[in-house]
Amino acid sequence: MSPTWRVLDTGVREAAENIALNRALLDALASGEAPPTLRFLRFRPCALLGFHQSVDQELDLDYCRAQGIAVSRRITGGGAIYCDEAQLGWELYAHKRDFGHASLAVISERICQAAVAGIRTLGVDAAFRPRNDIEVDGRKISGTGGIFEGDALLYQGTLLIEFDIERMLRVLKIPAEKLSDKAIASARDRVSSLKDILGSPPALPEVKARLLGAFEREFGVSGVEGTLNRAERGRLEQTLAEIDGEDWVRLIDRPTGDQPLHEAWVKTSGGLLRARARFDVPSGRLKQVWFTGDFFISPRRTVADLEAALRDTALEGLEARIEAFFEGRGVDMLGLRPADFAWVVRAALEAPALAPGTAA
C-alpha cells in the first residue's frame, strides 16, 4: 500500500493569511504535528516580496495602495511577484527522505519535472528551465522556490492560468520609460499563461487533478483530501498576528544614515544579488554591508549572519573571510556561490557613492 499525502485546498485568501499558512504548515510538519501535504491556494490581489528583498527597492507602493493591492513577504526567497485569483498556487510539504535527497537543487528539479508532467497532460508543451522555472516555448508559465526547516521542506509554485502583464509591470518598481507598449510586448515574449496557450483557461478542478496525479506518480503516494488539524490552526493564529503587519513587510528594510553609501548588483547563476555598503576610507575598513535580491538560501538567517560577520572588517582578505564564513555551514544556495558575495561587495565599493541620507 502506497504512503498517503494529505491534500488541502485552502481557496482564495488574503496574502498575509496564505503566508502565515506557509509558516504554520511547515513548522507543524517539522515538529511531527502534521503529515506530508499537497496544498492548493489562490490569492486576492497582492504583491509578494521574496524573503531577502527590500519593499522600497522592489515595489511601487503608491500604485499598490491606489489599486488596493496588498503587500506581503514570502518566507521563501526569489523575486517580487504579482498574484491574484487568476493564478493557482501549489505547495508541497514533505521531509527530505520523501525525495531521497538532501540537496534543494536536486529536489527542486524533481518536483518541477513532476509538475511539468502534470501540465503537459493539459495539452501544453511544458518544460523545466533551471534553476527553478517551468516554461512553454521559452516563456515562463510557473515560478517555483523552496525552503528547509530542519528536515522539513516547503516547495511552492505559481501556475499562471491567466495573467495581467500590465498590472504586474506597474506593481514592480520599474522606471516609467520602461512601461511602454514595447516593454509590455517584450514582457509578453517572456511570460505566458494557460489561457494564452490554450485559447481559454482550463477549469481549475481539472488543473488541480492533473497536478495531483503527477505528484502521486512521481513520488509513489496517494493523495487524500484533508483539513487543517488543531495544532496547525493554533500555529496559524499565532503566526498571522506576526505576519499581518508593516513590521513583517519591512523586515528587510535598511536604516537611513548620514554617511554616503555604495551600491551595485550582479546577476549570478543563483539569481540577482544586490549589495549596499558603507566604507570608511581613512581606516580602509568595510563598516557595514547589506545584501538583498531574488536568490534562494537556506537556512534563511545565513544572510544576516554574513552581514554581521563582515561588519567593521578590513577589505584585505575579504574573499578569504567570506569563504571561511561559509565553510562547514551546510548552506544550500541553489546556484549562488560564496564568491558572488565578495564580487558584489567589490563592485559596490567601486561604484560612485550615493547621496548622504539615502536609505540603505
Image (cartoon, helix red, strand yellow):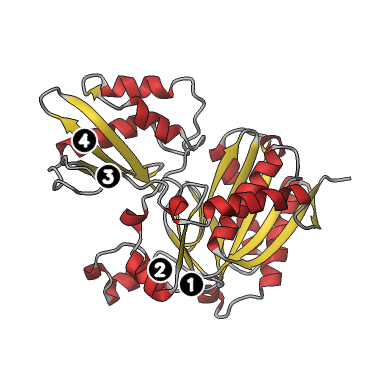
Q: Earlier in the sequence, mark 1 or mark 3?
A: 1
Where residue 261 sits, quadrant-wise, is: top left
Q: Residue sitting at 38 percent across and 19 percent down?
A: 324
Q: Which mark is residue 168?
A: 2
Q: Quadrant of residue 9?
A: bottom right
Q: Secondary structure at mark 2?
A: helix
> Which residue is found at the position 51% from the left and 70% from the top?
193
Contact between marks 4 and 1 (CB within 8 A): the answer is: no
Which residue position holds label 3? 265
Q: Is residue 140 left or right of residue 320?
A: right
- Specify which label sits upstream in the sequence, 2 or 1: 1
What amino acid type is highlighted by mark number 4?
Answer: Arg
Graded by Cα atoms within 10 Å as few (under 14), some (14 to 19) or many (20 or more), the crowding at tag 1 reads many
Report the residue marked by disc 1: 163
* Residue 279 location (% of width, % of height): 18, 32
Q: Secondary structure at mark 4?
A: strand
Compare marks 4 and 3 and give the one earlier in the sequence.
Answer: 3
Inter-mark Cα distance, 4 to 1? 40 Å
First along the sequence among labels 3 and 2: 2
